[in-house]
Image (cartoon, coloured by chain):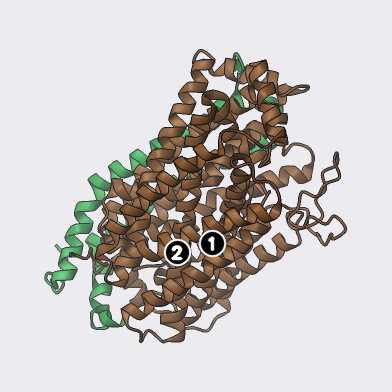
Chain colours: A brown, B green
Amino acid sequence: MITSLSSLLRAAETEDIGNPWVNIAIFGGFVAITLVIVFRASRNNKTAADYYAAGRSFTGPQNGTAIAGDYLSAASFLGICGAIAINGYDGFLYSIGFLVAWLVALLLVAELLRNTGRFTMADVLSFRLRQRPVRMAAALATLTVVFFYLLAQMAGAGGLVALLLGVEGAAAQGLVIAVVGGLMILYVLVGGMKGTTWVQIIKAILLIAGAAVMTLWVLAKFGFNLSDLLQGAIDSAGEGGESIIEPGRQYGVSAMSQLNFLSLALALVLGTAGLPHVLMRFYTVPTAKEARRSVVWAIWLIGIFYLFTLVLGYGAAALVGPEVIKAAPGGVNSAAPLLAYELGGTILLGLISAVAFATILAVVAGLTITAAASFAHDIYASVIKHGEVKPDGEVRVARITVVVIGILAIIGGIFANGQNVAFLVALAFAVAASANLPTILYSLFWKRFNTSGALWSMYGGLISCLVLITFSPVVSGKVDPVTGASLSMIKNTDIDFHLIPLENPGLISIPLAFVLGIVGTYLSKEPPHPEKFAEMEVRSLTGAGSEKATVH
Amino acid sequence: MTETFGERETDYQRVQTSDEFQALRHRFRRFVFPMTAFFLAWYFLYVLLAAYAHDFMSTKVWGNINIGLLLGLGQFVSTFAITMIYARWANNRQDAVAERLRLHIENGDALDGGPA
């Protein structure tokens, strides 16, 4: 193990882990296969329902696997493994929060949403509220969430590329991010939701299978004894290594960091049910019952995967070591691929990296199509064109949006390169939990709720999130006390405009958005619409009048 | 999209006030609200312990397996359990009633006499 570690260190120094050509060959093969599937699946894309909601023709298990594919992004695989490998037990919170959050979606949102909406989250919100302002707010919130999510995926792609292909230097990494972005645009343009769903399904199976193999491998190395694995992690972590299995290694430093932990926990558990690309998945099934089945499938797949990441994270700590991971190109996000290299050499590294690449590509595609649907359906068709637009016209705008968002994602990805992936995704969760979730819940369950309350809550949540993030240490002013290097997005340590020490805004912005929803509702003179609430409530619980599957 | 249902609005209100729908709604809320309160309370109890009760969470139970790890895994167990309990409950208790109401509404029958 000592020799392999030192060879790994040497490899890390020369930025030559694995064989770049093997990686490229495996990756290229995967892309080619999935593109063929996308082309085949997209032959029947005729209407907007086909393009956005895959004709509502997927079964629960299929859609559940696709949800898992959407959800298990680079943050879950690269980010959580890295967080556990470096920060130990504190990284485990991501797994738990990301999973428990699904109960909110299962119990309160998924089926009711499927029964009342058509394509996007805003469909449900505008059901009994005034359409145009609410759609506008919901679309802006959607675009913001997608933007932060994309940043995270691109940062993951950048780190992975840095490690795999030995690509060092901002310009070269930027070029690879541009290639990933280009592929993603192609996927979504050609495939629409149906093609994207199939990519998600294939990728989810590959990712979970790959993680399962690695998990068994790691456990086998420790005689299938979890306690021995933890001992290995303690031994590799060096002085004070015991802290890797105890809470507080990352968040126990001060009262402020403990608040950061609470804020993160709140954002994680309330974010999922407000994520627009997850909500949109509930529309790709024919009925609410299938929506429920798909969430049940998703919870099992996602939960099992997160149990794997616990082993993989501690496995990376034990077999690779936190210091080696931090020093490698790609930093904290490279724990999982480094572990693959340690276990199975170049071949396993190539395979696992190809899966990780595919993960990023597929998630980015899913996010992009959500943003495109949101812009084309909510802003263009409903707000700008007042709903008078031909279905193919809306799809055309969606395709243009895909291209624009693809370009923005590429630029943003180059900018966010180097940040912790799971952490960045948690920011998207905070925005979703603040801007979207209160309004979704109020409009489904609270009779008195009105347009004013929705706008107060959505804009209040969105703006407070953005302000808190902008003036947080994430953007500027966070300096590594040891090396003096910047840990923020702005790498110039002279620029420091951070005002709020909170790294995740959730602790402030989520309660604020819930309160603003109530305040805004009671301040408005808008007359209540009991007949619309009656329709919404009856439809949401019975499925009467819900959108049906299209038949070709 | 709501406009097309305009002429049925009173029908929806009639369904909403019907006994069968009220029972469906009442059962739904009585199940999901307490369940949501329960899993959120259990989750935040865990989070608060992890944030502030380091010594307690670091207590070793067996080998290097400590209480923190067991409680964390307990979150997984409770999530899986609640998922299966809810799915079974909804399949057995709610779906048939919801389906019957849906057919009544979509076929336009049985509304005058109130849903059976």
Mark 1 vs mark 2: tell me if same chain: yes
- Residue A75 percent location from the top left of the image: 56, 46
Kindly identify which residue carries mark 2: A370
- Residue A547 percent location from the top left of the image: 26, 67
The residue depicted at 84 percent of the width and 59 percent of the height is A496
For the residue pair A530 and A252, the one nearer the viewer reads as A252
- Mark 2: secondary structure: helix
The residue depicted at 45 percent of the width and 66 percent of the height is A446
Say what amino acid the circle numbered 2 marks: Thr
Q: Is residue A93 left or right of residue A541?
A: right
Q: Is residue A200 left or right of residue A240?
A: left
CB under 8 Å between discs 1 and 2: yes
Quadrant showing the N terminus of chain A? top right
Real-space Cα distance between discs 1 and 2? 8 Å
The residue depicted at 46 percent of the width and 82 percent of the height is A132
Checking the image for residue A146, the label placed there is 1
Q: Is residue B58 above or below residue B97?
A: above
Say what amino acid the circle numbered 1 marks: Val
The total of numbered circles placed on residues is 2
Image quadrant in which you'd find residue A86: top right
The furthest residue to the front? A21
Checking the image for residue B95, the label placed there is none
